[in-house]
Image (spheres, rainbow, N blue to C red):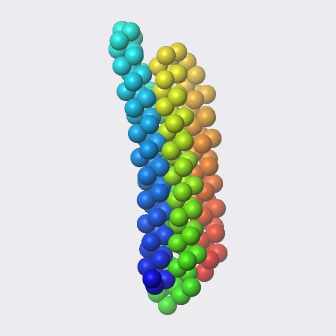
Amino acid sequence: MSDAAMIVAGAIACMGLAGAGSAFGTGFASAAAVGAWKKCYAANKPAPFLLLTFVGAPITQVLYGMIVMNKMLDFLKTPDKVAGLGVPLLVAGIFAGLAIGLSALFQGRAGAAACDAQAETNQGFSNYLAALGIVETVAIFALVFAYLAIGKIA
């Protein structure tokens, strides 16, 4: 496999893993929101629209994966300088995408718990959001550190 092909593979891996994590995370949180709303309707309580905040939180990791992907694909603009960069960028893409995607997955799991708690108690929104923000920070760190490392590869 050529270096250019490995760079593209790494970029796709990064985006794919980040996107998969976002899909899992939003899916977990969405299912919990639907269940929480059902409990509210069954109890004749208003269903809190705020739960969509928890549902949507893991979607940002797709953007982080895209940013890293674009940084990697920038190397293809100078084809004469890609020799030897294939393996390092493939590995960087896989591990950056994995870190970003796992952050989204676990943010969705925390969002699911937040949906249940918010709907049941109608209290604690800012606390739940802060917890989700901490999990988001893992993805932001992975994005920044991957971006810096990829910049040092060439």
- Picture coordinates of residue 134, whole percent (x, y): 63, 41
- The residue at the point 43 percent across, 59 percent down is 16
Visible residue check, residue 83: yes
- Picture coordinates of residue 68, whole percent (x, y): 52, 64
Horizontal arrangement in the rendering, residue 132 relative to residue 8 (left or right): right
Farthest residue, direction top: 44
Nearest the eye: 147 or 40: 40
- The residue at the point 56 percent across, 47 percent down is 103
Nearest the eye: 99 or 142: 99
- Picture coordinates of residue 120, whole percent (x, y): 49, 16
Farthest residue, direction front: 1
Q: How many marks?
A: 0
Split into 4 quadrants, where in the image is the C terminus? bottom right
- Picture coordinates of residue 108, whole percent (x, y): 49, 39
Farthest residue, direction bottom: 80
Visible residue check, residue 77: no
- The residue at the point 57 percent across, 45 percent down is 136
- The residue at the point 48 percent across, 55 percent down is 18
Q: Is residue 66 above or below residue 71?
A: above
Horizontal arrangement in the rendering, residue 60 relative to residue 44 (left or right): right
Q: Is residue 63 above or below residue 39?
A: below
Q: Is residue 112 above or below residue 105?
A: above
Q: Is residue 45 above or below residue 63?
A: above
Nearest the eye: 71 or 116: 116
Split into 4 quadrants, where in the image is the N terminus? bottom left
Horizontal arrangement in the rendering, residue 42 relative to residue 136 (left or right): left
